[in-house]
Image (spheres, helix red, strand yellow):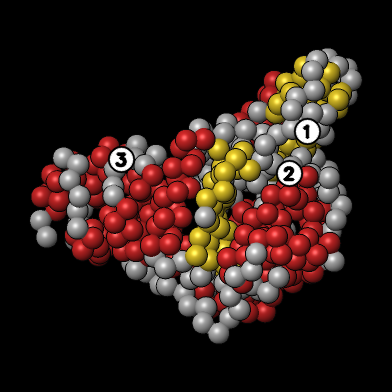
Amino acid sequence: MIVKLLLDRKREGKELAPEEVRELVAAYTRGDVPDYQMAAFAMAVCCRGMTDAETLALTESMRDSGTCLDWAGFPPSADKHSTGGVGDKLSLIIQPLAAACGLAVPSLTGRGLGLTGGTADKMESIPGYVAGLSLADYQKVVADCGCSLTVQTGEIAPADKKLYALRDVTGTVPSIPLIVASILSKKLAEGAESLVFDVKCGAGAFMKTREEAVALAHALVTNAKGAGRKACALVTAMDEPLGFAVGNANEVREAIDVLQGRCAARDVIDLSVELAAWMVSLAKGIPLDDAVAWCWENLENGEAYRRFARMVALHGGDLEAFQKTLETSVSSLEVVAADAGYVQSIDANGIAQAAFELGAGRGKSSDAIDNLAGVDLCVKRGDRVETGAVLARVSTTTRPEQLEPAAARVRAAVVIGAAQPSPRELILEEIA
């Protein structure tokens, strides 16, 4: 293989044979192809795109660069992947809910960087919770309670880790073939037989337009099926935060409230049930309506919460200590309405910026997170408010000087007007 000739062809928009893509990735993983040539390849792909055959070859070769897990002997397996959003604590609800319906739900998750929070960071706001299990311990947890939320180890898709680091510094992140290969290589290595993708769309999402989100959703489903998996995708709105809580510990609190039937965040509840039901429907081969009914049953009878609590305990977490953590003294400030009217919209990006400034996120991987920092909304789109009503509370333990600026961001993000807006459309498209 002469790498320069492959780069020349891809630069000119020509299709590479699957075996050429596989050989390139294998050589790069071994260290036989230097970073500068792989960066050139990523830029060529970003500019010229890839065919479905090329994308699948890239995905499978990245999957095969490390360990691939096998769930033979387990119940039918499924997982859900979200492209990330503001207040997106759905994995904390969906994974134990699907497990309560008899699935094995192996879920390798990530940490947050920038405005979007990471599921592992949220779970580690529970005292004692270890998100970095070995693969062997990870499989033991799934065998015991049906689900596990564990960070990806270096054994899973190492080619993706190398390539993503290059993409991050060379301006080649926004390429659908490269995004698909990155997401899907890890999910395929994880081993779940059925995959459901929640592709977010809007101000608080990576994909800002519906057209971009639909294109990514189609590509994920096409390539997952090409790799022999059952798959579907939901394109969902991320113009406003999901639920009321944005942060780490406060999102875990809201997820627990949902699992225990104490939460009024209909968007979180309804979308969690819908996505879990798709997992159950695909994995069990049953009609979606039946899967929805089954999910509601296991949410309402407490079985999903019991699975969650068991998973937390197996990861070393202490839910009683977590409840005490929520009582820790924090610096907080109420955000009040300047006018009366109806909440027209709540800008997800503005809320995320406020939470980030308070310490709920990290700008670089080495930054520490303030688990108790964040924004707790008190209103949703369509709510009627009076002048002086509390719209939200902003909190921090480490950056009290940011309370006023964060409150100003939240105030600007909550738009109030005279007319009641139409209901928000949460699920924009379903692709199966």
> Dividing the picture into quarters, in which one does residue 46 lie?
top left
Q: Is residue 402 shown left or right of residue 72?
A: right
Q: Position of residue 44 (x, y in %)?
A: 24, 41
**168 lies left or right of 402:** left
Front residue (pair 124, 344) = 344
Looking at the image, the residue that sits furthest to the bottom is 73
State the residue at coordinates (68%, 54%).
274
Q: Is 186 above or below relative to 15?
A: below
In the rendered image, the quadrant that contains the N terminus is: bottom left
Asked whether disc 1 touches disc 2, contact meaning CB atoms under 8 Å apart, the reply is yes
Residue 427: image x %, image y %? Answer: 63, 43
Mark 3 falls on what kind of element?
helix
Q: For mark 1, give the secondary structure.
A: loop
Specify the label residue 46 is tagged with: 3
Q: Nearer the viewer, residue 276 or 380?
A: 276
Q: Which residue is mark 2?
A: 267
Q: Which residue is mark 1?
A: 380
